Image (cartoon, helix red, strand yellow):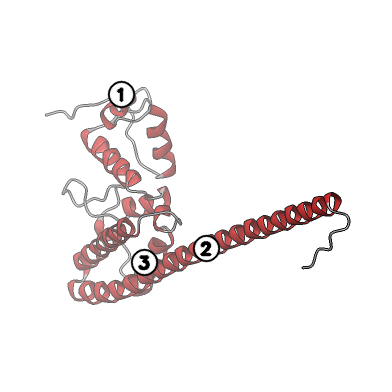
Amino acid sequence: MENVRYMISDAANIVNVESHVLRYWEEELELTIPRNEMGHRYYTEENIAQFQKIKEWKEQGYQLKAIRMMIHSSQPAMGNGEFYGGQPAAELQTGGNNVIQMNREYVETVPKPMVEKHNNPISNTVKLEQFQSMMLNIVKQAMEENNPALGKEVGVQVGDRVLKEMNYLMREQDEAEEERFRRLDEAIRATRKSKRFHREKKEKKEAEKRLGKDKKLSPNLTVTE
């Protein structure tokens, strides 16, 4: 049965984004989109499923850089032994250094909401756990396809490394929140002190003004303080 071909406008409607968004994702994520005999883009069910997954990641707060790495290093999209980016699983590098480097790159592209100051800490924790689980599954599956024993060993090592770096990110976020509240407290204290100073200054002037009026009304009256 021949696969259904969708025009870019139809694909955009299914994914519920603008057409230019699909073209932007194609370029930034280095996606391979088929073209017909006239050189025009067309989209298959697999392409649309991929775009829907990309949209889901975007809505979860992931940057395109992180999504690009997940696509080109991800598990098979349709069960045919190829990744989303069209790269066969067997072509993935399996050296320990490469795995650690990939781990580092993943952590460096943690979604922005995770480190923004005003985020909900509970929501950030859930996203960190989801990110860690996704990255570990990608690494372990790719490694086990080539070397099961090595895959398990590296999976544990990467898991410990990711956990440490995730904890570091959470600690940084907590410290940032603590610093923000400290500055807010200082600002509140400074404002209160300033208001109290101006209030006391105003009261002193009013007292001096009343004292001056009393002296004018009673020039022979001796005022003792």
Q: Nearer the viewer, mark 2 or mark 1?
A: 2
Q: Amino acid at mark 3?
A: Asn
Q: Nearer the viewer, residue 203 or 72?
A: 203
| Residue sitting at x 35%, y 40% | 32
The residue that disc 3 covers is 103
| Residue sitting at x 25%, y 72% | 155
The residue that disc 1 covers is 7
**Residue 146 image position (x, y, % from top left):** 22, 67
Residue 44 located left or right of residue 118: left
Tell me where residue 172 sits by quadrant: bottom left
Q: Amino acid at mark 1?
A: Met
| Residue sitting at x 24%, y 26% | 5
**Residue 193 image position (x, y, % from top left):** 62, 62
**Residue 74 image position (x, y, % from top left):** 27, 54
Mark 3 and mark 2 lie on one chain; the one further toward the N terminus is 3
User: How far apart, in angstroms, are the residues tagged by discs 3 and 2?
Assistant: 38 Å
